[in-house]
Image (cartoon, grey):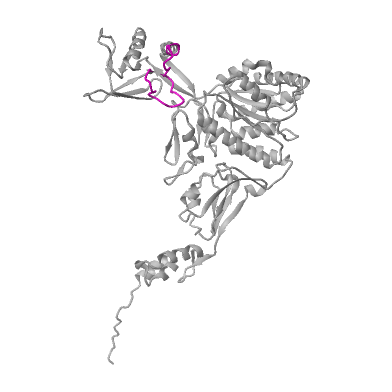
Amino acid sequence: MNIRLNDGAPADPVRNGRDALARQAARAALEAIPAFEAAVTVDYRSAGRVLVAGPAAQALPWADRLATALPVTAILLDAPVPGAARAYPVHVARAVAVAGWLGAFEARWQAEGQPLGRDKFDLVLDLCRARLIPTHQRPHGYFAPGEDEAARAAAAEALLDMVGDFEKPRYFNYKERLCAHSRNGRQGCNACVDICSAEAIAGDGDGIKVNPYLCAGCGACTTVCPTGAITYAYPPAQLTGRRIQAALRAFREAGGEEPVLLLHDGGRGAAMLAELGPEAPGRILGLNLHHAATAGIDVWLAALAYGAAGVAVLMTDEHAPQYVAALGQQMAVAQAVIDGLGYAGPHFQLLRVDAPDELALALRHAPRGEVPREPAVFHLAADKRNTLDYALDHLQRHAPQRPEVVPLPPGAPFGTLAVDRQACSLCMSCVGACPAAALQDGQGLPQLRFIEKNCVQCGLCASTCPENAITLVPQMRFGETRMQAVVLNESQPFHCIRCSKPFGTLQMVENMLGRLATHPAFAGKLDRLRMCGDCRVIDMMEPRDEMKVTVLKRD
């Protein structure tokens, strides 16, 4: 268990009973909110063509069973024992590869002495020792039950039902203009690509591309996205915020104290929580999400602003390990912010448990963090950064301490930049690379300006800077200065030595002269580097060292 233990007051049966009654009021408030129905869906069509792949002794019996109801093709990784001919295609291959999703799988296989085989299938039953599609999240229509016979029977039964037209929600929305993935061939943020357990996300130029057929709706990409370029749409953040507000309000009005929001999904975590039943502490308010990784730092901080004494996220071994790591990193950032504001904690708890008794122990140590005396009334916004602004503003206004700056752990999506003024030539390459408008030019002045509120610490500015003059500094700044443009570097304008027009900065020209002084192409002509572009051309075109002939006229 990954738990931050809380040594608070011992259990009080009377208090716990009152909290349990208040929890019933919170559940009623949640049930009163209509279920979300997706307006945009992703459609699949399956004709039932099944590929069964694996060793002959394993694959052929299951292929025979399925062939009585579905069109089957078997690809065997070893030669079968000679026997009766089968009514469906059978291929023996030394290697096979499969990719795709329900209704659109493609298989390729290589047999000894034969050309590469290729065919399309709607469904796959993978009985190989090593899965053909190794992603943690498996595509719809792909079954790899392992060696357990009961699991294989369940997979075969499910395959029989997967013929026809199917649909699922489109789980995400994407705004490329906000994406910090890449600029000018340099990679910035790769968080969504790295975390996707279905491998549904890939870089696509300066942005990303999400395959909606592979996307399983875990929402982890939206949680780690620093800009809000990719957002969760099933349900949208506004509805999740409405549910949290309703539950906490009802709990508080019914006399409950120190509520902890327990975020979980409908898998093993929900089953364990249901098994605990009334044994769970009364102040634990379970909130069922489509996936436990769909909510991140913006939702957690908003929950504290609404009055939650803590936020716990329940993960099991069903969840991809990268999800657990990412949520842990986000919790470290969130706790650093709350600690910096002086709220007594801890406030966050990441649970990795696989048995009800482990869950019961963890929940007895659920956080009892200090929260604002006045619950917030703002609503979660569609834009992630806006929600963070609302939550941070409320938490800071009611905080026990009012620091101007709170240091954050490395990798935090908030911070400032340290610029080496001696190295920076104010070339403004970083301004062109910044995807969040955090870096700006001086609007006619030789200045590099910065708005900390906009910075997502993607690192594109640092990797683009030709002088290596930029360093990321993770931190959270409060107050008006966070939203104001500040000057990170400035220089005197350099004036053309010929026409006196300003055309660059003193630092830039000095750097250029220092680098090119020994270059043979500029030997004896360094003054041209001190000229603007127009004067440089004129100087190059003027005749040099030509003989002058004077013609004298006779009277």
Placement of 230 over or under 530, stated as above or below: above
Magenta extent: 126-152
Q: Residue at x 48, y 43 (%)?
A: 188
Where's residue 541, x and y in %? 35, 70
Where's residue 141, x and y in %? 42, 19
Please give left or right for residue 189 compared with residue 278 in the image.
left
The residue nearer to you, when weighing 403 against 208, is: 403
Q: Main secondary structure of the magenta part?
A: loop
Where's residue 97, x and y in %? 34, 25
Q: Is residue 82 visible?
A: yes
Q: Is residue 386 visible?
A: no
Q: Residue at x 74, y 18 (%)?
A: 21
Where's residue 183, x and y in %? 45, 45
Instruction: In the displayed orientation, state which residue is furthest to the right.
Output: 14
Indicate whether residue 532 is drawn in magenta.
no
The residue nearer to you, when weighing 8 against 547, is: 8
